[in-house]
Image (cartoon, rainbow, N blue to C red):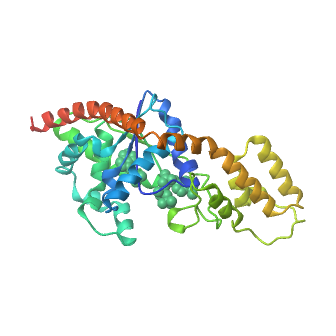
Amino acid sequence: MRVLSGIQPTGRPHWGNYFGAIRQYIDLQTEEFAYYFVANLHALTTIRDKEQLHQNSIDTALDMLALGLDPNHAVLFIQSDVPEVSELCWILMSGAPMGLLERCVSYKDKLAKGLTSVTGLFTYPVLQAADILAYDSDIVPVGADQTQHIEVCRDIAQGFNHQFGEVFVIPRAKVLDSSAKVPGTDGEKMSKSYGNFIEVFEDEKSARKKVMRIATDSRPMEEPKDPDTDHLYQLYSLFANDKEREEMAALYRKGGFGYGDVKKSLADAAANYFAPARERRAELAAKPEEIRQILGDGAATARKKASQVLKRAQEACGLK
Ligand code: ADP
Ligand code: TRP
């Protein structure tokens, strides 16, 4: 199976992104072919600062590598280093029905959030389709918000195949398990847009401060509590092992503990959990030559595949 996914370099990952997405992507790197790329062309539709786009792209690659993406298993590259994708995008755009894109909710959502209505934002799903089809991807792991884009990709690919012959592999979405939404510091879903997040690589002191400020109820210490409905316990569970989780749950049921102690345990557990990744990231960041090499090798492998698929598409529709 060929697995592929793209990560937009629009900000640093928070705990919700890690448990809800990144960890699950990385788990799929053991598939026969696993391609992951930093979607800097997609980010160009919203980030209009040269330094920021460049730095974010490197940071995203570093984050993925630090969190366990292994270049010996998976191919990691920067989207724009494979120009074949942009060329394929035009071929797909030439046949993609307007109505298909007009129905996409992400475009409407972005406009509603006040983003500038640029053409690239509207045609964004076609570029995503080119990303996927260029590597004969079978499986595309994505969050639930992206399933419509995978449907668009399938429609575009089927339309092309119908007209010109079997050129593209029809991919399937693998919707990541987001049943356990990671709560934020206010108890609502952790999200960049709610300002209730703690970043994976946040300075330890600042992360601890945020943990100590997590909203809790004002029930007295003696009162027994149900761990399963408590967001502090949910957060602690993400970082604790089975034994620690059980012990904490028993403490909740018994009562007589303070939320302050749970917060301290949570801050310690989170710091320990991410310590190896933090160390790896610092090591890698100090070796820009190595990063360049990994991304260069990744792009070379990706280009080899994408140029074969592009050639197939060009021949099929009369461009060669
Ligand atoms: P944000 O809400 O912070 O802008 P994104 O929409 O960029 O996050 O999400 C990127 C990925 O991380 C998606 O696959 C999404 O499902 C996952 N994700 C984001 N927040 C959470 C959360 N609180 N719990 C679980 N998964 C999350
Ligand atoms: N649109 C995706 C997101 O915002 C990122 C992305 C770009 C992508 N190209 C892709 C994801 C191809 C999967 C496959 O998260």
Task: Name the residue: 86% across, 70% down.
Answer: 220
Q: Quadrant of the C terminus?
A: top left
Give the residue furthest to the front.
286
Q: Say left or right for 261 vs 122.
A: right
User: Could you say which quadrant of the image residue 225 lies in?
Assistant: bottom right
Q: How many marks?
A: 0
In this view, the residue in front, 214 or 159, is: 214
* Residue plotted at (67% across, 49% down): 271
Residue 304 shows up from this direction: yes
The foreground one among 190 and 270 is 270
Residue 81: image location, x then y, percent: 28, 42
Q: Residue at x 55, y 40 (%)?
A: 280
- Vertical placement of residue 308 versus 99, above or below: above
Q: Is residue 312 left or right of residue 226?
A: left
- The picture places residue 154, in percent across and down from the top left corner, at 32, 44
Question: Compared to 131, does 29 lie above or below?
Answer: above
The N terminus lies in quadrant: top left
Q: Camera-side residue: 107 or 70?
A: 70
Is 47 located above or below residue 170 in the figure? below
Q: Which sits in the foreground, 126 or 14? A: 14
Q: Residue 55 location in percent, x, y?
A: 39, 53
* Residue 316: x %, y % from top left: 14, 35
Is residue 67 among the parts visible in the rendering?
no
Q: Quick check: 50 left or right of 36?
A: left
